[in-house]
Every structure is written in structure tokens, then in C-alpha cells.
């Protein structure tokens, strides 16, 4: 029996109804629906689901973001059209099963023993032989042999009849094996139905039904969870849900958040989760290799307390709700920040805040900004391999050919450069939002970092958009390991009196007192260069003062011929570095510190400080917030789910495995042996002989089926060829 691909044909009723039933029950329609679901699932895998609309706008642009939202591609698995396709697939596949199952079951019970003896000669695999026994004895012997080999056998005795359509007397042995092949069809298609039904039960269909018929609505506002009205909350008896709940260390939570495409719903749990301790362990790369939560589950009805430990792939279960360790986050760490002036009019100050907590209004000069505490990262592991790659050649005595080859083979992301991973300490992430609502994101490291050149620097990161990488301003750490030296030097550079004193000190060291005219020329050049670098004078008339090396370059382009710029630039840079060295020592003297010697260590610090001062003119904030202290509070993010369709899906998966295995690896075979008296050997007193004709049929012809046919010929008919 072959499975038909057309639909169930109804012979009564309106034409539209009959056509609809035939379409829904056709296998081609079910395959088309399954293809659409597969394509939608691929989109749902590639495109992040349930992201804020701003994330899609930043990544794809306004047009595509609105298109994704209109087509519900940002929440495919809860989209009405996806659920509708699942429902139609269930109906279509169920009708396919209902249409073909009766015929399959009838075919499993049929041996087809009424086949004509003459028809056996039309089979591709057939054999003929003469047996030295009566047809009845041969039929019984062959039937027993087949039955012992796992075949189901039926014997039919035929009597001779007269007439034009006469049949000869004899015995027909009909046998079949591999009936599980057809049962595999039923199992595989039933699996699709069960998986879809389980998906509908555990999906958003039940939750959305409550918003349609039970007076619930999606919450789109903000604020505290306790202040959300009841119409946005689902009861603890909700039969199916899947949401997230964040619980800080020492805190409790009993309300999960169910993300919807246009907002959230709050799911009440029949218990509260208290996080006693959060445990996290890291790889050398900085990635977490273990995070677990030690919790206590408080029953809200009986008050029973149940301790549990939740790890990744080791969930806890209570009252039909599975609790999974999803991730971890900051639970409201307390931080202390100090504002480091990055503009001339800025002043230092200190603030305290909580990560994710209320923002702080700060006013510094004419700028009014809102400080938002975004993130605290205690561990930051970076790769410093390139910083150590300082050699100019390879030592042939250290070349290992095997290591050199292995370093270039393997995975595509494998390189021949070893990683040098180092934890560079905590960092604070924050946002500064201006009066118009525009915000820039900052990430500043708490301790100085040696990037490989021997001069530790503080890394001050900034980016305009979330999808952009951070750009870092490198501020050198002074001999006390702080940014105070940089701040003092910058303040002295902004003071005209300090600049004048620095120039005079430089003139006294660099010129001969007997040549005052040269001293005066050098004074004019040094004063102008220092003012340009400090940003107190514009590089050209009518322009805005920029400061730093940018101002020096603009001044050279305007006032120095192109042929002389290289020589004049070298002289000007040398003069400026010497004067800035005096500015550095003047700033230290003002703080009561000893002057620095003009050695290699001081020059390394001065070089980095000059670069940082030059780049600081382009720093987009008046202050940089540096973390001075913090108290970390960690939080666990749990996924809580009540999934009654889970067992249905598991059963469907089991049936799918069985069905596919049966259809691919079980061969349906049928065998017929026609046994009739041999008229040539029946004369006189010669022993009775039987003419045997055997035919073999298999649904999928393979080498194994050929071997089985040869084996049956030898075993049943004693044929060796």
C-alpha cells in the first residue's frame, strides 16, 4: 500500500467545504506549513527576540525596525500568524493520519494470499524449483521455516475448478514481515501533532487568551513592581507561563516578568525565592565557568521553607514550576565616585549611587547633566599578547617545526600568537544625559593598567552609541598611583601666570644670558606655543581655540611654508616638551611635592601626560567619574516556567525517533510461494513432486534485500543459484 498525498475527499456538502477539507488533509499542504514554520524558526534564531525597539533601530534602521515590528518578527514564537500556522498544521496532520491510518491497519492484517499464481511470474525477484514432497507437506514445511524466522504466515489451499477462468489445485504460502515500516508513518506524523500541541500549550497562546477574554492587559509603563495594577498580573494558578525573575543576594522575589511584544505581564508565583548566596567562578579568559545560587523557597500558603541549589542545567522544581539558573546581574551595588575635571571650568566633587538605582543630577559650571549608574564589572580580562610582541626576528635555535605547524592548523579562529590574558581590575559604567535627553556611555577603570610600555595609565572609555566600541583616553598614573599629577599639570597649564613662570624657567636653562636677543625670540615662541597647546589662543584669527597637538598643527599650516614645516615642527615640539616639563614641576611645587628629575622614567610619564592633555580637549564631558570604592551586591536571574506540554513534547520526540527509525531502517517485505503438483513426475509409482514458484517483494530494494532473497531461495527451495 502506498500512502496517498491527496486530501480527504468528501462526497457530500458544499463544494467550498469539500475543497477546504481536501486541502487541509493533503500531505502537500502539511509539508508547505511545516516549511513555513522552519523558515520562521530560522528567522527567530537569527534575529534576537523581544528586544527593545531602539535596539532594532540602531542595528537595522527605522524602516526595517518598523517592518519587523509590524510583521511580529521580533516575537515570532508568540505571533498570531505563527500560532495560527501551528494550529493549521495540527489539523492538517491529524486529518492526514485519520485518512491513511485505517488503510495502513487493514494492509497490516492482509497477507494478499489471493494473488493469482500466474502473477508471481511478473515479479522482479522470483525463483522456481521442484520439491520432492507433496504440496501440502511443502506448504507446512515452508510455513514453519518462515514463522521461525520472524515472518507472519498464512496458508491457503486452493481446489481445482472448471470453466474458462479455472484455477489449478495447490497451496499458496503468503508471508509478510517489517510491518513496523508503516507504523513508522503513523508514529512520525503523530509526533508532529504532539509536538505542535505541546508547543501551543507551553507557548504564549494561553497567556494571550487571558488578555483577550479574561480582562488582562499588557503593562507598558515603568516604576516599582508593587505598584503595577492587578489587570497586568496573572494569577499563581496560571496553567502555563515562562518568565524571568531577578533576585539580589539577601532579597526575595515572587513575581516573574513575562516579556510581550508590546510590554510585559507580571506572573505571580505560588512561592517566593530568597537568594542566600550567589556563587560564580571564572575561566582565565574572564568567561564564567560556573554560576550557581543557593536559595530558599518560601511557600506563600503554608509558610514551608525548602532549601535548594540551582545551577545551569540543574534546575529546581517546586509546585509544578521549574526554576532554571538563567544568568546573573548586578543586584544594586553601591559605588562611590569622584569627579575628575576634564575641562578648565570643571571642579572636583564626590557622589554615591546604586547600580540601576535613581540617577543623580550634577551641575559643573554651565553644564547640567544627569548621571545614570549603569554597570559595575569587578573582573575585566583583556588580551595583552600584542604588547609583548616586541622582537624583530626569530631565534632559529628556538624554532619548533611541529609547534609552528600545529599553531596554523585546526579551527578557523586559531592563531599562532599565544594569548596573554590579564585581569585589569574593576570598572564602572555610567551614562551622562544632557538636557535634551541625549546620552553618552562611559566606562572607566578603577586602577591603572600597564599596557606594555612600562607606564601605567587610567583607561577612560567613551562611546556615542551602544553598538560602537569604546574609545579610550589614557591618563598616566603619577608616582602615587593616582590621576592627581595629571589634574595638577592640566590646571597649571590653564593658569597664565604658571605658564609664564614655566617659560621663564625654560629660558633661563636654554639660553646664554649674554645673548638677550635670542632669549627674547625664544620667549615669544615658547609663550605662543604653550598658549596654543593650552587652548587659550586660537591657531588662526577668527577660529575657535582647540588646544593640544591639533592646535599646533593648525598653526603650522597657516604660518609656516610647507617646505619648512618638518624642520620647524621638530624645533617647536622640542621647545614645547621642555616647557611642559617645567609646567609639570611647577604643578608639583604648588602641591608641596619635590620636583621630578629629568630622567627616562619622568620622560615616559611626561610623554603620556602630554598626549592625554592633548586628547582631553576632545573629551565630550566636563568631568570623568572615577570609582573610589564599591560594595558589590550580586543578583541571580532565574527563568521560571510551568510547562504542562513538556511531557507531550517529550512523548512526541520519542515517537518521532521511533517513526523515523522505522521508516528508514525497517524494510517491509512480502513473500509468496505457490506449490502445485508436478504432472511430469506423477506417472507410475514415482514419488510425488511439487512445482514451486516463489516471488519476493520489498518496499526499498537494497543489497540486503538481494541477500535475503538468495538466503530464502536456499532455505525454502534448496536452490544454490
Image (spheres, rainbow, N blue to C red):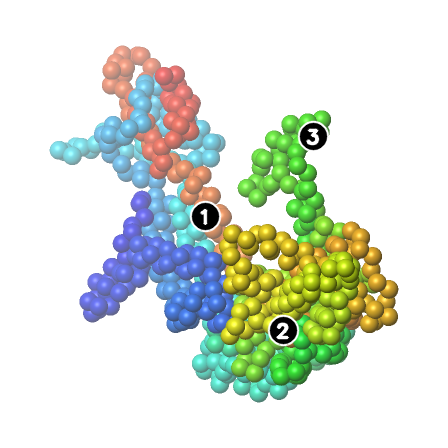
Which label lies toward us, 3 or 1? Answer: 3
Q: Secondary structure at mark 3?
A: loop
On the image, numbered disc 1 is attached to which residue? 659
- The CA distance from mark 3 to mark 1 is 63 Å
- Whether residue 108 is visible to the viewer of this picture, yes or no, is yes
Name the residue at the front extreme.
514
At 58% from the left edge and 80% from the top edge, which residue is drawn? Answer: 434
Q: Which numbered tag is attached to residue 536?
A: 2
At 66% from the left edge and 37% from the top edge, which residue is drawn? Answer: 392
In x, y percent, where is residue 119? 24, 32
- The CA distance from mark 3 to mark 2 is 53 Å
- Whether residue 352 is visible to the viewer of this picture, yes or no, is no
Mark 2 burial class by Cα count in 10 Å: few <14, some 14-19, many 20+: some
Discs 3, 1 touching: Cβ within 8 Å: no
Mark 1 burial class by Cα count in 10 Å: few <14, some 14-19, many 20+: many
Mark 3 burial class by Cα count in 10 Å: few <14, some 14-19, many 20+: few
Q: Please indicate whether residue 147 sits to the left or right of residue 97 in the image.
A: right
Does 23 appear above or below 108?
below
Q: Please indicate whether residue 616 sits to the left or right of residue 446 in the image.
A: left
Q: Please indicate whether residue 502 sits to the left or right of residue 197 in the image.
A: right
On the image, numbered disc 3 is attached to which residue? 395
Q: Which numbered tag is attached to residue 616?
A: none
As rendered, which of 29 and 116 lies closer to the eye?
Answer: 29
Amino acid at each position: 500500500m502506498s500512502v496517498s498525498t491527496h486530501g480527504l475527499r468528501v462526497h457530500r456538502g458544499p463544494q467550498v467545504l469539500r475543497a477546504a477539507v481536501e486541502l487541509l488533509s493533503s500531505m502537500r499542504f502539511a509539508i508547505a506549513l511545516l516549511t513555513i514554520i522552519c523558515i520562521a524558526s530560522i528567522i527567530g534564531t537569527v534575529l534576537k527576540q523581544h528586544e527593545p525597539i531602539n535596539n532594532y533601530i540602531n542595528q537595522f534602521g527605522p524602516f526595517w525596525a518598523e517592518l519587523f515590528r509590524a510583521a511580529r518578527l521580533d516575537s515570532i514564537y508568540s505571533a498570531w500568524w505563527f500560532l495560527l500556522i501551528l494550529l493549521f498544521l495540527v489539523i492538517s496532520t491529524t486529518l492526514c493520519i485519520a485518512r491513511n491510518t485505517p488503510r495502513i491497519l487493514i494492509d497490516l492484517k492482509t497477507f494478499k494470499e489471493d494473488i493469482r499464481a500466474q502473477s508471481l511470474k511478473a515479479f522482479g525477484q522470483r525463483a522456481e524449483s521442484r520439491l520432492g514432497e507433496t504440496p501440502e507437506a511443502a506448504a507446512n514445511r515452508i510455513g514453519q521455516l518462515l514463522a521461525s524466522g520472524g515472518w507472519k504466515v498464512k496458508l491457503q489451499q486452493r481446489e481445482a475448478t472448471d470453466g474458462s477462468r479455472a484455477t489449478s489445485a495447490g497451496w499458496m504460502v503468503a508471508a509478510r514481515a517489517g510491518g513496523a515500516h508503516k507504523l513508522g508513518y503513523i508514529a512520525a506524523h503523530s509526533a508532529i501533532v504532539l509536538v505542535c500541541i505541546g508547543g501551543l500549550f507551553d507557548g504564549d497562546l494561553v497567556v494571550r487568551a487571558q488578555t483577550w477574554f479574561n480582562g488582562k492587559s499588557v503593562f507598558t509603563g515603568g516604576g516599582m513592581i508593587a505598584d503595577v495594577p492587578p489587570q497586568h498580573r496573572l494569577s499563581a494558578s496560571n496553567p502555563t507561563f515562562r518568565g524571568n525573575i531577578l533576585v539580589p543576594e539577601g532579597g526575595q522575589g515572587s513575581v516573574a516578568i513575562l516579556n510581550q511584544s508590546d510590554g510585559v505581564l507580571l506572573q505571580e508565583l505560588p512561592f517566593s525565592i530568597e537568594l542566600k548566596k550567589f556563587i560564580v567562578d571564572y575561566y582565565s579568559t574572564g568567561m564564567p565557568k560556573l554560576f550557581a545560587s543557593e536559595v530558599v523557597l518560601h511557600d506563600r500558603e503554608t509558610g514551608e521553607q525548602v532549601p535548594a541549589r540551582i545551577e545551569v542545567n540543574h534546575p529546581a522544581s517546586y509546585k509544578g514550576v521549574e526554576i532554571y539558573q538563567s544568568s546573573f546581574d548586578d543586584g544594586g551595588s553601591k559605588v562611590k565616585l569622584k569627579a575628575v575635571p576634564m575641562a578648565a571650568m570643571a571642579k572636583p566633587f564626590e557622589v554615591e549611587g546604586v547600580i540601576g538605582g535613581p540617577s543623580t543630577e550634577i551641575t559643573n559650571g554651565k553644564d547640567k547633566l544627569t548621571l545614570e549608574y549603569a554597570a559595575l564589572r569587578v573582573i575585566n580580562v583583556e588580551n595583552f599578547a600584542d604588547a609583548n610582541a616586541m622582537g624583530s626576528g626569530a631565534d632559529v635555535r628556538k624554532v619548533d617545526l611541529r609547534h609552528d605547524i600545529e599553531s596554523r592548523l585546526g579551527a578557523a579562529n586559531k592563531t599562532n600568537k599565544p594569548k596573554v590574558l590579564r585581569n585589569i581590575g574593576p570598572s564602572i559604567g555610567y551614562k551622562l544625559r544632557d538636557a535634551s535627553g541625549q546620552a553618552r556611555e562611559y566606562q572607566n577603570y578603577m586602577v591603572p593598567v600597564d599596557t606594555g610600555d612600562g607606564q601605567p595609565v587610567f583607561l577612560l572609555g567613551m562611546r556615542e552609541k551602544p553598538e560602537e566600541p569604546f574609545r579610550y583616553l589614557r591618563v598616566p598614573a603619577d608616582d602615587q598611583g593616582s590621576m592627581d599629577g595629571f589634574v595638577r599639570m592640566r590646571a597649571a597649564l590653564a593658569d597664565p601666570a604658571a605658564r609664564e613662570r614655566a617659560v621663564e624657567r625654560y629660558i633661563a636653562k636654554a639660553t646664554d644670558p649674554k645673548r638677550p636677543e635670542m632669549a627674547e625670540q625664544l620667549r615669544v615662541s615658547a609663550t605662543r606655543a604653550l598658549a596654543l597647546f593650552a587652548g587659550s589662543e586660537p591657531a588662526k584669527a577668527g577660529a575657535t581655540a582647540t588646544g593640544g597637538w591639533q592646535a599646533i598643527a593648525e598653526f603650522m599650516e597657516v604660518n609656516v611654508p610647507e617646505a619648512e614645516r618638518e624642520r620647524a615642527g621638530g624645533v617647536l615640539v622640542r621647545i614645547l616638551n621642555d616647557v611642559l616639563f617645567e609646567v609639570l614641576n611647577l604643578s608639583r611645587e604648588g602641591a608641596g611635592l619635590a620636583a621630578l628629575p629629568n630622567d627616562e622614567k619622568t620622560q615616559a610619564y611626561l610623554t603620556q601626560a602630554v598626549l592625554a592633555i592633548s586628547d582631553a580637549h576632545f573629551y565630550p564631558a566636563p568631568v570623568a567619574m572615577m570609582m573610589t570604592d564599591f560594595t558589590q551586591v550580586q543578583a541571580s536571574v532565574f527563568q521560571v516556567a510551568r510547562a504542562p506540554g513538556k511531557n507531550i513534547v517529550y512523548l512526541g520526540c520519542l515517537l518521532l525517533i521511533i517513526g523515523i527509525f522505522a521508516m528508514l531502517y525497517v524494510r517491509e517485505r512480502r513473500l509468496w510461494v505457490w506449490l502445485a503438483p508436478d504432472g511430469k513426475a506423477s506417472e507410475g509409482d514415482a514419488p510425488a513432486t511439487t512445482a514451486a514458484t516463489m516471488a519476493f517483494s520489498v518496499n526499498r530494494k537494497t543489497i540486503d534485500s538481494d541477500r535475503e532473497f538468495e538466503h530464502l531461495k536456499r532455505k525454502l527451495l534448496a536452490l544454490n543459484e
